[in-house]
């Protein structure tokens, strides 16, 4: 799952789930998102126009819609959930221990690639490594470990 950050007021960043502009949309895909821009809407990504109205966003891409400045992040804080099968969800196999993630188990769906990992007291498969082995999303459950604009790495 990705996140969008909006600069408002200048120098301050707020997390948001949507772009919030007419004619501009975001489609989430594993590991990132695709930006869709309707013909005639003025949008720039990293200072460049969006030819054809379609652009694959990378982590930390800057999106300008008019005077609105947004940043795309491929990261969001991981959440421990109680695994429950929904009609559109197949049973999961944990990629770390290769064991089944069963109904009622505590588990984390990687915000980057969507794979399910155990997060049990005696089997913390998700936090076993510092990053997801598939998409490199950081695993700490602490929100502060997730990238946000204006952090030390800028
Ligand atoms: Zn496991
Ligand atoms: Zn992942």
Image (cartoon, grey):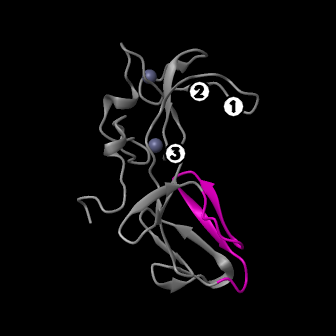
Mark 2 — residue? 92
Mark 1 — residue? 89
CA distance separating discs 2 and 1: 8 Å
Total numbered labels: 3
Distance from mark 3 CB to nearest ligand 2 atom below 8 Å: yes
Q: Is residue 31 magenta?
A: yes
Label 2, residues with CA under 10 Å away: few <14, some 14-19, many ≥20: some
Q: Quadrant of residue 23?
A: bottom right
Q: Is residue 22 above or below residue 80?
A: below
Q: Is residue 70 magenta?
A: no
Give left or right: position of 125 versus 85: left
Which region of the structure is painted magenta? Answer: 18-41
CA distance separating discs 3 and 2: 13 Å
Q: Which mark is residue 149?
A: none
Label 1, residues with CA under 10 Å away: few <14, some 14-19, many ≥20: few
Q: Residue 83 placed where, x, y %?
A: 58, 22
Q: Residue 70 placed where, x, y %?
A: 49, 69
Mark 3 — residue? 113
Screen quadrant of the C terminus: bottom left
Q: Are marks 3 and 1 in contact (CB under 8 Å)?
A: no
| Viewer-side residue, 11 vs 43 | 11
Give the residue at x 56% y 68%. Answer: 56
Give the residue at x 23% y 59%. Answer: 152
Q: Residue 7 placed where, x, y %?
A: 44, 67
């Amino acid at each position: 799952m990705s996140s969008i950050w909006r600069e408002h007021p200048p120098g301050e960043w707020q997390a948001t789930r949507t772009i919030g502009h007419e004619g501009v949309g975001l489609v989430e895909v594993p590991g990132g998102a695709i930006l869709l821009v309707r013909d005639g809407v003025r949008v720039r990504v990293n200072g460049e126009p969006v030819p054809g109205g379609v652009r694959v966003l990378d982590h930390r891409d800057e999106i300008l819609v008019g005077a609105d400045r947004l940043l795309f992040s491929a990261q969001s804080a991981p959440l421990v959930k109680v695994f429950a099968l929904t009609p559109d969800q197949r049973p999961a196999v944990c990629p770390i221990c290769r064991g089944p993630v069963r109904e009622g188990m505590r588990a984390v769906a990687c915000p980057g690639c969507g794979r399910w990992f155990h997060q049990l007291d005696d089997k913390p498969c998700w936090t076993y490594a510092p990053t997801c082995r598939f998409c490199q999303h950081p695993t700490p459950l602490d929100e502060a470990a997730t990238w946000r604009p204006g952090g030390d790495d800028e």
